[in-house]
Image: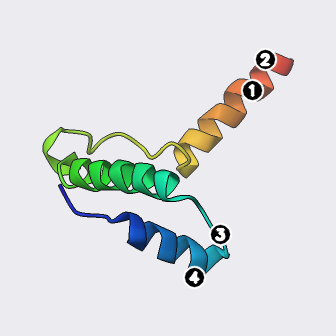
Amino acid sequence: MPMVTAETVKQVLRDLYGYEISDADAHSIARGAGAMLTLAGHLGSIGIAGIEPPFGYPVLLAEATRTSKNKS
């Protein structure tokens, strides 16, 4: 699993957003980020090539069409 440290999390949040968080929160975020980075490396092997991103244009268009039909 990629190593994301609590110190890195705290520094990024401080430098980019001016946020200060507790050590416990930073450790929790670091564990979650490390797990997500590990899983992201395997996305190509699970056969999701035909799935649109959740906010891709075709999905948004289909949702708008569906929503407008419900109002009629």
Residue matched to label 4: 15
Residue matched to label 3: 19
Disc 3 to disc 4, C-alpha distance: 8 Å
Residue matched to label 2: 70
- Mark nearer the N terminus (1 vs 4): 4
Near-viewer residue (37 or 51): 37
Q: Identify residue type, mark 4.
A: Asp
Q: Residues within 10 Å of mark 2 (few under 14, many from 20)?
A: few
Near-viewer residue (46 or 41): 41
* 20 over 65 or under it: above or below: below
Q: Identify residue type, mark 2.
A: Asn
Callout 3–callout 1 Cβ contact below 8 Å:
no
Rendering coords of residue 20 (x, y %): 63, 68
Rendering coords of residue 58 (x, y %): 54, 44
Callout 1–callout 2 Cβ contact below 8 Å:
yes
Judged left or right of residue 70, residue 21 is left
Residue matched to label 1: 67
Q: Identify residue type, mark 3.
A: Tyr
Disc 1 to disc 4, C-alpha distance: 41 Å
